């Protein structure tokens, strides 16, 4: 007997080879298979008499094959099978290209259903390569709404469809009902069984709608439970209760006036710090919005309370930059700073560790090294991490294990539309800095194609002659990527640029380099030892090079809008007028429309909203960016209202049953949610 955990090899027609192909799609068990929902559907439910069909329509006809199918070989690699089919209202000529087996599979005098596009010329009707099955065939693929699945080379639609059908047959009694009965009723949702049956083989479009509505709700509900549970466990934790401080004292020492949004974020976080509970706050703000100062204000408040803070950056070079910024903000108060990274010498490490242990440092800045086992903290009260999408939910929780429940502040420069951020970061409270410091210049952005190359090179030459520096970003080329050849790899493009500009110094960093090597190249670029830096998106994460005033993105169509916006944020950080040039030869209005958005606005939140609208949330919230698991059915943009309802229901349930002990199936799924997607972090 099969159950949901049974291996797909159990199914008829699934041997080793097909099983491997399924595994590439992430499908191992029957349950995985059932959770592979169709991408779209074909309406093959409408039958028409042949005589009533019109040119260009796609329909099912029931017809008798009137003559023996004839095979003719036109030339090598091209053969045809032709025959005529009739019903009471008319006739149609049917042709199959390169499907010679049809000759023996279709018999004169028998009835079939054909599904395909009708072509009418004069009084004659024709169909080419229609879907065909015998009228009496079981579980057919005509006469109904037929699912269309995501497939790959080794799996065709029929294989997938038959596998899903078998899986459903064997397991329909066991499909877990994750939704508590009251919630299911209150939300007027169908049962799990109905939903699975109709998402794959909808009886009609209404049934499909009902099924989809339930699965969307379920998916968002599970997500909300998972996030809600994380928050529950955190909120209940007692934290250091800081004595209130007068933050004006800190502001007065700054070289600038904080913006309203910065003040708001600081106040929200300070309120957390003195609440008695542990703070878990995300500060989200566009590149350049001044998140570092917010962090500094909290470090200052912790220091006033005799607590030490740790600030973790994703790379060495960013750690170095944060150190200089923080020194500027905090040294005037006599706050003692230190740095600890993988490349610190053994002696430095020893000294810093000793100081941390004895409480002689008030702020330590570094990389992951900060949280390695042998680092001990005295009075660690606050942990700050920068650029959260590089760490993800799991890493975050691993690292707060240090010290006695320190407060946590996460800073992210990936703007997410406000309504969604509040819900999606269910495990964190969110502050949004939606205002840039005054006097920021706009980065002029242009989308161009290859024909602009010569002018672009001229522009690069001119800027370099003026002493400016230039970023060039190429998409990451993965080894298994079957990409069109014209895609530029960073290394190759760097070589080309060096040939085009023999007088300039071209440096290159890419994904396959070791972190140390990357940091060395970046550091050299920051200190002006190269004119052009060619890279993959490793520079996305926030290094400041005020002298850089041009960002060129090659194959811009390969990047998400939010990512492009981040890249653009690398320039315009100094006093020089700055530009961003998006190079793309991809045709298509969609690509143009996307790149146009960037040309029109410099506001990261607007870009994020448009990105979400255009690309669909699957990509936008791809787990790599957001640390969230991939959604199968839910559309986090379009289903925002359902998301809200699902979240309310989840919070109510967690109120009654915080550990979900009374809902074991749900609990298991919730626990698995982040576990399964853990691999995709970083
Ligand atoms: P991000 O949010 O991208 O981390 P930073 O914190 O690095 O931004 O700030 C970007 C730059 O703006 C820094 O040079 C910082 O000193 C400056 N800055 C921050 N806040 C203000 C402000 N209120 N007024 C003027 N400049 C500011
Ligand atoms: Mg920053």
Image: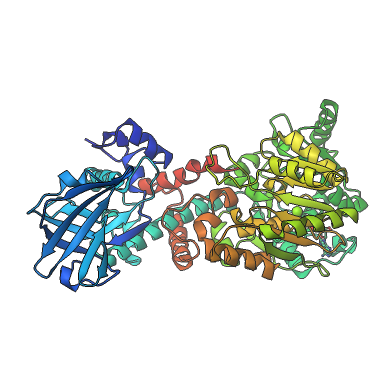
Tell which residue pokes out farthest to the left in this image: 109
Q: State the image quarter where residue 286 is shown.
A: bottom right
Which quarter of the figure is the N terminus placed in?
top left
Q: In this view of the protein, which residue sits in the foreground, 417 or 599? A: 599
In the rendering, at what x and y percent does residue 264 appear? 73, 66
Q: How many labels does the image show?
A: 0
Ligand 2 is found in the corner quadrant, namely: bottom right
Q: Residue at x 50, y 43 (%)?
A: 677
Taking 318 as reference, is 92 left or right?
A: left
Taking 90 as reference, is 116 left or right?
A: right
Vertically, is 514 above or below 272? Answer: above
Vertically, is 545 above or below 436? Answer: above
Tell which residue pokes out farthest to the front in this image: 75
In the rendering, at what x and y percent does residue 517 appear? 76, 34
Please indicate, yes or no, whether residue 620 appears anywhere in the rendered image: yes
Q: Which residue is drawn at 87% across and 43% down?
A: 529
Please indicate, yes or no, whether residue 662 appears anywhere in the rendered image: no
Vertically, is 205 above or below 76? Answer: below
Which quarter of the figure is the C terminus placed in?
top right
Taking 353 as reference, is 58 left or right?
A: left
In the rendering, at what x and y percent does residue 330 appear? 87, 52
In the rendering, at what x and y percent does residue 222 appear? 43, 53
């Amino acid at each position: 007997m099969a159950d949901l955990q049974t291996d797909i090899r159990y199914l008829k027609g699934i041997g080793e080879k097909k099983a491997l192909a399924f595994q590439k799609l992430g499908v191992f068990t029957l349950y995985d298979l059932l959770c592979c929902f169709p991408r779209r559907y074909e309406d093959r439910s409408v039958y028409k008499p042949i005589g009533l069909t019109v040119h260009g329509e796609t329909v099912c006809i029931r017809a008798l094959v009137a003559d023996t199918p004839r095979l003719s070989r036109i030339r090598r690699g091209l053969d045809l099978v032709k025959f005529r089919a009739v019903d009471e209202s008319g006739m149609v000529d049917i042709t199959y290209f390169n499907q010679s087996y049809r000759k023996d599979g279709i018999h004169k005098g028998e009835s079939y259903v054909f599904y395909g596009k009708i072509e009418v010329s004069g009084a004659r009707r024709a169909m080419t390569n229609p879907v065909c099955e015998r009228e009496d065939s079981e579980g057919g693929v005509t006469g109904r709404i037929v699912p269309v699945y995501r497939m790959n080379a080794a799996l065709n639609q029929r294989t997938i469809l038959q596998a899903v059908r078998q899986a459903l047959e064997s397991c329909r009694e066991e499909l877990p009902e994750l939704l508590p009965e009251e919630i299911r009723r209150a939300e007027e949702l169908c049962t799990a069984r109905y939903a699975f049956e109709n998402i794959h083989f909808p009886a009609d479009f209404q049934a499909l709608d009902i099924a989809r509505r339930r699965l969307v709700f379920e998916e968002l509900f599970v997500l909300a439970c998972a996030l809600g549970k994380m928050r529950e466990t955190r909120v209940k934790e007692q934290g250091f209760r800081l004595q209130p401080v007068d933050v004006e004292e800190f502001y007065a020492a700054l070289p600038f006036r904080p913006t309203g949004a910065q003040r708001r974020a600081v106040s929200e976080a300070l309120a957390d710090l003195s609440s008695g509970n542990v703070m878990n706050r995300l500060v989200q703000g566009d590149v350049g919005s001044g998140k570092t100062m917010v962090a500094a204000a909290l470090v200052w408040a912790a220091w006033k309370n005799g607590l030490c803070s740790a600030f973790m950056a994703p790379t060495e070079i960013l750690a170095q930059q944060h150190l200089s910024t923080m020194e500027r903000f905090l040294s005037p108060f006599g706050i003692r700073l230190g740095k600890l990274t993988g490349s610190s010498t053994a002696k430095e490490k020893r000294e810093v560790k000793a100081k941390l242990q004895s409480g002689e440092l008030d702020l330590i800045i570094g990389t992951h090294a900060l949280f390695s086992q042998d680092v001990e903290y005295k009075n660690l009260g606050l942990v700050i991490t920068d650029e959260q999408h590089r760490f993800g939910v799991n890493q975050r929780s691993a690292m707060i294990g240090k010290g006695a429940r320190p407060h946590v502040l996460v800073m992210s420069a990936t703007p997410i539309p406000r309504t969604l951020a509040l819900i999606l970061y269910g495990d964190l409270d969110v502050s949004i800095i939606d205002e840039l410091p005054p006097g920021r210049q706009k980065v002029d952005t242009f989308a161009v194609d290859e024909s602009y190359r010569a002018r672009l090179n001229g522009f690069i030459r001119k800027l370099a002659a003026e002493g400016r520096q230039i970023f060039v970003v190429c998409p990451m080329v993965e080894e298994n990527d079957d990409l069109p050849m014209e895609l530029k790899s960073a290394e190759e493009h760097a070589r080309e640029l060096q040939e085009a500009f023999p007088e300039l110094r071209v440096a290159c960093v890419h994904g396959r380099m070791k972190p140390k090597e990357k940091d060395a190249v970046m550091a050299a670029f920051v200190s002006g030892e190269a004119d052009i830096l060619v890279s993959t998106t490793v520079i996305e994460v926030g290094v400041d090079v005020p002298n850089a005033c041009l960002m060129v993105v090659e194959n811009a169509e390969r990047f998400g809008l939010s990512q492009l916006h981040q890249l653009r944020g690398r320039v315009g950080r100094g006093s020089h007028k700055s530009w961003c040039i998006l190079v793309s030869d991809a045709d298509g209005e969609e690509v143009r429309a996307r790149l146009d958005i960037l040309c029109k606005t410099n506001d990261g939140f607007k870009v994020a909203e448009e990105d979400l609208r255009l690309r669909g949330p699957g990509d936008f919230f791809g787990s790599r960016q957001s640390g969230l698991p991939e959604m199968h059915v839910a559309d986090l943009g379009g289903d925002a209202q359902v998301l809200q309802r699902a979240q309310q229901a989840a919070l109510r349930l967690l109120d009654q049953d915080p550990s979900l002990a009374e809902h074991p199936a749900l609990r298991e799924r919730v626990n698995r949610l982040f576990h399964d997607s853990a691999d995709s972090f970083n």
